[in-house]
């Protein structure tokens, strides 16, 4: 989400894939749950920021 370039985004994605692959099977479900929770929180934060900016923009 915070990657500045496509290359940086690809590197982050690969790092996450490598980390996931290195986990024991019993930890993969925990990883998925925590990652989904993190992503949901970030998307909510981004939506809130977007709506705040959008609301400010329509006032002008």
Image (cartoon, helix red, strand yellow):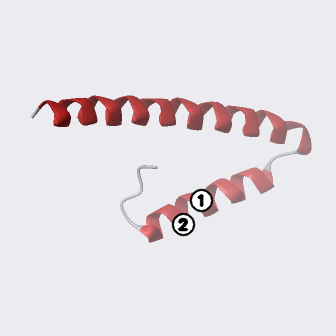
User: Is residue 19 or residue 50 the one in the foreground?
Assistant: 50
Q: Which mark is residue 13?
A: 1
Would you say 23 lies left or right of 44 here? right
Q: Residues within 10 Å of mark 1 (few under 14, many from 20)?
A: few
Residue holding disc 2:
10
Q: Residue at x 14, y 30 (%)?
A: 59
Q: Residue at x 41, y 36 (%)?
A: 46
**Which residue is situated farthest in the bottom direction here?**
7
User: Is residue 55 or residue 47 the one in the foreground?
Assistant: 55
Query: Splitting the image into 4 quarters, where does residue 47 fall?
Result: top left
Would you say 24 lies left or right of 59 here? right
Q: Residue at x 46, y 71 (%)?
A: 7
Q: CA distance from mark 1 to mark 2?
A: 5 Å
Q: Which mark is residue 37?
A: none
25, above or below 12, in the image:
above
Check disc 1 and report its element: helix, strand or loop. helix
Q: Position of residue 22 (x, y in %)?
A: 79, 53
**Which residue is situated farthest in the right direction here?**
25
Q: Position of residue 43 (x, y in %)?
A: 50, 36
């Amino acid at each position: 989400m915070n990657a500045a370039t496509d290359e940086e985004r690809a590197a982050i994605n690969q790092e996450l894939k490598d980390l996931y692959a290195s986990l024991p099977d019993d930890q993969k479900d925990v990883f998925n749950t925590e990652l989904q929770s993190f992503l949901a929180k970030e998307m909510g934060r981004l939506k809130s920021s977007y709506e705040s900016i959008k609301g400010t923009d329509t006032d002008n």
